[in-house]
Image: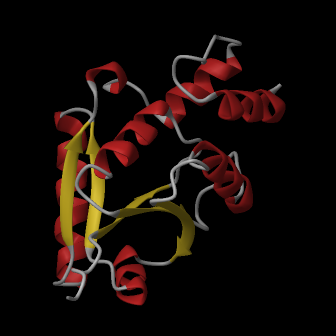
Amino acid sequence: MDCPPLKKAIYPGSFDPITNGHIDIAERALQVFDEVYLAVFVNPEKNPLFNESEKIELIKSIFKKTPRIHVVSFKGLLSEYANQTKIYTIIRGLRAVSDFDYEFQFALTNRKLNSKLETIFLMTDSRYAYLSSSLVKQLVGFSADISPFVPKQVEEALKRKMT
């Protein structure tokens, strides 16, 4: 008897840095998918705090005991990356209605570029509805306690980078 194919999804983002909100979405996606690929988007037009290898190392350290989450990076269009990997389901987290406007436009554009793509939206846990990477970086700049928002290794990496 043949095994059914694995259900896989791509969870793309800049993850600069990854937050507890991102982690929540990734872990909840595992309730629906057999494998989730956290795909760090490398945008040459942005000036991230963490470089590609630093982000990948941090994210891998967070999910080291979660073998069904794979950490990868990609450059270029998500629609092309989906074709390369033959993974056509995209996971996106939504915090508020304002996120939906942007994400809806993003999903429709990706679908126009690649008709095989489907985007699945997961609502964030209410604990993280306000949380963003930008907010975390801003809080670090003011020496605020960020331990409720990011894992310990991210907190330490942020403090090394920003202090």
Left or right side of 100 for 84: right
- At which x and y percent is residue 91? 29, 57
State whether residue 41 is above or below residue 116: above
In the displayed image of the protein, which residue is found farthest to the front? 1
Residue 66 or 58: which is nearer the viewer? 66
| Colour mode of the rendering | secondary structure
- At which x and y percent is residue 52? 68, 61
Number of residue marks: 0
Residue 73 or 108: which is nearer the viewer? 73
Left or right side of 154 for 5: left
Left or right side of 159 for 60: left
Left or right side of 63 for 97: left
- Residue 48 seen anywhere in this rendered image of the structure: no
Residue 36 or 82: which is nearer the viewer? 36
Residue under the image location 57 percent in, 68 percent down: 73
State whether residue 80 is above or below residue 125: below
Quarter of the figure that contains the N terminus: bottom left
Q: Quadrant of residue 88?
A: bottom left
- At which x and y percent is residue 128? 36, 25
- Residue 110 seen anywhere in this rendered image of the structure: yes
Residue under the image location 45 percent in, 59 percent down: 68
Residue under the image location 70 percent in, 33 percent down: 153
- At which x and y percent is residue 107? 21, 64
